[in-house]
Amino acid sequence: MLPSSLIAELDPDGGRTGARRPRRTVRDWLVDFGCFLLAVAIGLLAADALENEPNLPRAMEITDQTAGALACAAVWLRRRWPVGLAAAMVPVSFLSATAGGAALVALYTLAVHRPFRYVAWVGGAFLALQPLYYWLRPEPGLNYFASVVFGSVILGAVAGWGMLARSRRQLLLSLRDRARRAETEARLRSEQAQRLAREAIAREMHDVLAHRLTLLSVHAGALEFRPDAPREEVARAAGVIRESAHEALQDLREIIGVLRTGDSDEAGRPQPTLAALDVLVAESRRAGMKVTLAGHVTHPAAVPVSVGRTAYRIVQEALTNARKHAPGTEVSVSVTGAEGDGLTVAVRNTPPGADVPHVPGSGQGLIGLAERATLAGGTLAHGPTGDGGFEVRAWLPGR
Ligand SMILES: Nc1ncnc2c1ncn2[C@@H]1O[C@H](COP(=O)(O)OP(=O)(O)OP(=O)(O)O)[C@@H](O)[C@H]1O
Ligand SMILES: [Mg+2]
C-alpha cells in the first residue's frame, strides 16, 4: 500500500534495473482514480455553473467544456509529467473553468513529486493569473476580492498539502537510509571483530604449537642420533617427548575450545605472563639449548597482563626460531623495564656453526610477532646481527 515512487526509492536495485517506470501499486490506482473523479466532479460543477454566466459567448462555453474534458483526461498523465502537466494547466485553467479541478490535481501532484522551486514557479503563475481571471469572469454571487482571496486560499492549501505529503515521504526515506547505514556499519564492525579474533587465534596457534613441536622434535632428534645413550637418558628424553606431546594436545584443545565458543582469547584460557618466562627458558634448556635469561623489571607486578603476555610470546617464538634456524647456538634473552618507560625484550643468538638444515615453516612467526607488538602499542625489529647471529628486539609500552 505504498506509492510506487516511494517503493522505487526504497528499493534502489529494483529501480535501477531498466529505465522502465515503476508499476502502479494498488494505492496508486486508488489515488489516481480518486484524483480523476475529483477533477471530473469539480469540472461538472463548473460546467453547471457556466449557465449562470449570461454574457459568456456560446463558442467560449464550448471551448471551456472541451478543454475541461481534455484536462480531466490528462490527469492520468500526472505521474509521468508532473511539471509539464502543471505548467500546461496554467493557461488551460485560465481559459476553462471546467479545467479547475484538473488544475488543482496537477498542482498537488507537482508539490508531491518535485522540489519547492517548481511549486513556487507554477503556483506563482496560477496566483498571478487569478485576479485577471476573476476580473474577466466574475463569480456570480461573490464579490471580486472575496473570489480572489478564496481562490488563492484553495491554491495555497492544495500546494501545502502536497508539500506536506512530500516531506513525509522524504522523512521516511531518510529514516530508512539511516537504518540501512546503521545495519551496514554493524555488519562491517562484526566482520572486523571476527577477522581480528581469527587472526589472534591463528597467531596463538602458531606460537604455542610451533614452540611445543620444535621442543618435541629436538628431543626426538637426540634420541635418533644417540640410540646408544644410557637407559635413564633415553627414558628421560622419551618422558619429555610424551610430556611435550601431551602439552601440545592440551594447547590445541584449549585453542579449539576458544574457536568453538567464539570467545576472545582472554576469556577462555589461562594466559602466560612475564613470570612464566623462567619456565619457558627452563623448557628450552632441557631440550639442550644454551639459554641465558637476563633482565631486570623493576615492578613485574605493575606490568599489564596483556603486555606481559605479548613479551612472553615474543620470547617464545624467538626461542623457537633459534631452535629451528640456529640450533646449537648460545641464546641470550633479556627483558628489562622500568616504570614509565615500558618493557624492552631482546632475544639474540650467536651465529650457527655448521650449515643449518632447512626446516619447513610458514614464515608467519616474525610477522605475527610484529602484529602482536603493534597491537600492544609497541614496536618490533628483527634481523641478522653484525657477527652473523640473529636478533629480535621489541619495545612494549608499560601501561
Ligand atoms: N634465530 C634465527 N636465526 C637465523 N635465522 C632466523 C632466526 N629467526 C628467524 N630467522 C629467519 O627468519 C625467517 C622468518 O622467520 P619466521 O619465524 O617468521 O618464519 P619460520 O620460522 O620460517 O616459520 P614459522 O615461524 O611460521 O613456523 C626464517 O625463515 C629464518 O630464515
Ligand atoms: Mg618461526
Image: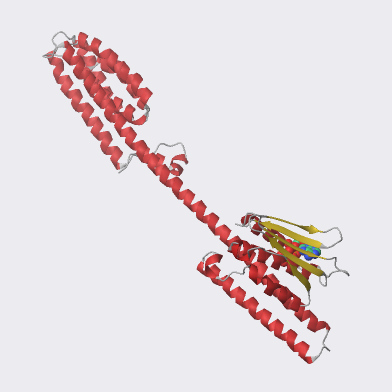
Q: Could you say which is closer to the camera, residue 95 or residue 206?
A: 206
Q: Could you say which is closer to the camera, residue 178 or residue 197?
A: 197
Quadrant where ligand 1 appears: bottom right
- Name the residue at the right extreme: 354
Determine whether, in the image, residue 304 is placed left or right of residue 37: right
Where, quadrant-wise, is the C terminus in this rendering? bottom right
Please tell me whether residue 17 is drawn above or below residue 334 in the rendered image.
Answer: above
Can I make out residue 364 in this image?
no
Q: Quadrant of residue 353?
A: bottom right
Determine whether, in the image, residue 225 is placed left or right of residue 253: right
Determine whether, in the image, residue 111 is placed left or right of residue 283: left
Where, quadrant-wise, is the N terminus in this rendering? top left
Can I make out residue 82 in this image?
yes
Residue 14: x, y in percent?
43, 43
Residue that appears at 14% across and 18% down: 49
Q: Quadrant of residue 273?
A: bottom right
Q: Could you say which is closer to the camera, residue 185 or residue 298?
A: 298
Determine whether, in the image, residue 10 is placed left or right of residue 353: left
Residue that appears at 74% across and 64% down: 334
Residue 263: x, y in percent?
51, 65
Q: Could you say which is closer to the camera, residue 300 or residue 166?
A: 300
Please tell me whether residue 135 is drawn above or below residue 5 in the rendered image.
Answer: above
Q: Quadrant of residue 92?
A: top left
Residue 238: x, y in percent?
73, 85
